[in-house]
Image: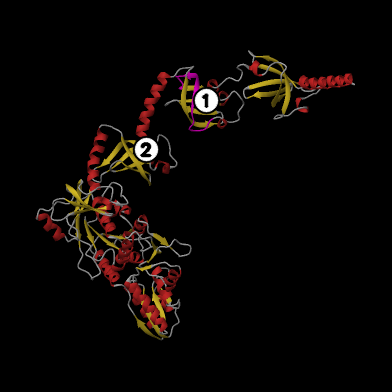
Amino acid sequence: MQVLLADHAGFCFGVQRALDLVEDEVKQKQCVATYGPLIHNPQVVERLARQGVKVYDDLQDRTPARLVIRSHGVGPEVYQEAKERDFPVIDATCPFVKKVQTLAQRFTQKGYQVVIAGDRNHPEVQGILAWSDGKAFVVANGEEAATLKLQGKVALIAQTTLKEATLREIEQALRAQPVELELRNTICAATGNRQKAARQLVNEVDVMVVIGGRNSSNTVKLAQICRDTGVPTYHIEEAAELEPEWFTGKQKAGVTAGASTPRWIIEEVIQRMTELNQEKETEFQAQTQESAAEFEDMGESFAESLRIFEEGAPKEGGLVTGTVVKVRQDEVLVDVGGKSEGVIPLRELATRTPDSAEGIVKVGDEVKVVIVKAESEDGNMILSRRRAIEREKIVHIQEAKEKDEIVTGEVIAVVKGGLRVDVGVTGFVPASQVDRGYVENLNKYIGQTLRMKVMEIDTRRNNCVLSAKAVLEEEYKQARGKTWEELSEGQTRRGTVRRLSDFGAFVDLGGVDGLLHISEMSWGRIKHPNEIVKEGDVINVFVLKVDREKEKVSLGLKQVLPNPWDKITEKYPIDSIITVTIVRLTPFGAFAELEPGVDGLIHISQLADRRINKPDEVVSVGDQVKVKVLDIKEAERRISLSMRAVKDDEANAEVQEYLANQDNQ
């Protein structure tokens, strides 16, 4: 499959100028903010954000910063507010947009009825409208223009990214009215050239890829122009969105890009398209010509590439060793012994793109690199340290697969269907292979290091499919076998609470789960196991019973805890008065808790100093009452208590006190 790049694809002069202004401010360590997104490209805006560039939608309660007016421009009120709030302004408005703003202001001041051809919701159009004091009419097509009731002097200006055909349609609708029309075609030459080049290229290819932000007006129009021809057209923002089936059976694929699309994204898309082609070696033939002075040549001609190869230049895809000669924030220069230095872009420096090249390598380091492009438009080789690392790592991954060895890697992202991991190359762990069971929330694995087995390898793309489940299952089986060998009744073992139920808890003893019944959790009464343990707790348990045939294990927890009946007679001597809690009523009395695990019986005859028919005539569950310890049968774990005896003692005490007082008189 042949990949053809359209003339004039990518950054236009105005966008490049805006980006250069911002980056110059960043290099000077200034606090920088843009008024709205600088350009309609989320990847570029995100990259600037990583460099500390803020985006302000308004200036109220904002941190003071050098305010960059975006390439789409703004209305005069923004400049005034910035001045009042002491925001230094760097005006990055595209010169072509600035021209339209000036025309809107001048025509309005001269008494013209101004008509703006464009999208009323686009920031560029909103800014132009503001320069007309809000008096201009905005129309998107000829139908809307035909609804205007105009007469006298009318000025027609256009959004810089408008399609030429749309402007002509609006012009015809206005000329049908009784007006004196002044037409100023303010469509940017770059826009026209880009659209023309796309229209020419799409007729020569089987499929078209249009690169740019989905909120980019000029990119959306480019995609529509291509679709209108009937050729399958795909609008993407970055290389990751490409799908292999788009190019199945296709001989030629075309690529163009909107004005807000940087070169590095275009190169990534072309590289990815090359990698996706499995039928034959991709021939990349850039069809660019020298354009207007504000444009840079985006492609390298096939003839020039052929000449370089014939002269014995390093072959693209080759692995070479070079020496780092300069480290910049966004790139590294490497001497590989050629006629010029090679450049490693930041995204090609490591397996995960760093924020800065500084600290990754240093001057003098020897590095292995893959030659991505023999000679760029700047005359330098484009190199990739990342791909060199991946080539070496994929060999180790292949060896690990052959030897059934474990590899380790950090989880770097949650993607559709699983996890992306860094094992030196990009690895994918399907959701079904993350753990032994179903995992509901994959996000908790981000940043964790997994131990995995290699399932599949794609050496051509330097990626692989991995399984953490395979390692866990293997270790589980080994641990389970060892545990069954060692397990016996009467042992105290350490385990992890895996699951709770109403009747108990399941404890993992090491590949073998045992049931800790609720009745064996505490010497006292509990309503639910969560009163004692929770999932994830590591506890000591007593092995009560082992059934190897049915593979069942019964466990106890209270057996490893202090027995409250130990030294019971010392804690509660006969005839002592204590406070207890009523826990259960029966026809023959009430059971009271002395402490968790120790209950005593207050017989119905001992509940009151009078005859009662039912215990609930005197007490209720939960009541705290004073009782006298009548008897303790330690071996049988029975304690007899009496409320009546306490009252009798109190009555006797009152009598004795009364008699003593009488004697004193």
Q: Is residue 184 above or below residue 565?
A: below
Q: Amino acid at mark 2?
A: Gln
Check if residue 549 falls in the magenta segment: yes
**Which residue shows up at 60% across the image and 17% down it?**
566
Q: Position of residue 364 (x, y in %)?
A: 20, 47
Q: Is residue 648 above or below residue 92?
A: above
Q: Which residues are magenta?
A: 533-551
Q: Is residue 655 above or below residue 473?
A: above
**Which residue shows up at 48% across the image and 17% down it?**
489
What is the secondary structure assignment of the residue under circle 2?
Answer: helix
Of the numbered discs in the image, which one, if any, rests on residue 516? 1
Q: Position of residue 333 (x, y in %)?
A: 21, 53
Displayed quadrant of residue 298: bottom left
The residue that disc 2 covers is 433
Q: Position of residue 207 (x, y in %)?
A: 27, 59
Residue 603 left/right relative to 438: right
What is the secondary structure assignment of the residue under circle 1?
Answer: strand
Displayed quadrant of residue 343: bottom left
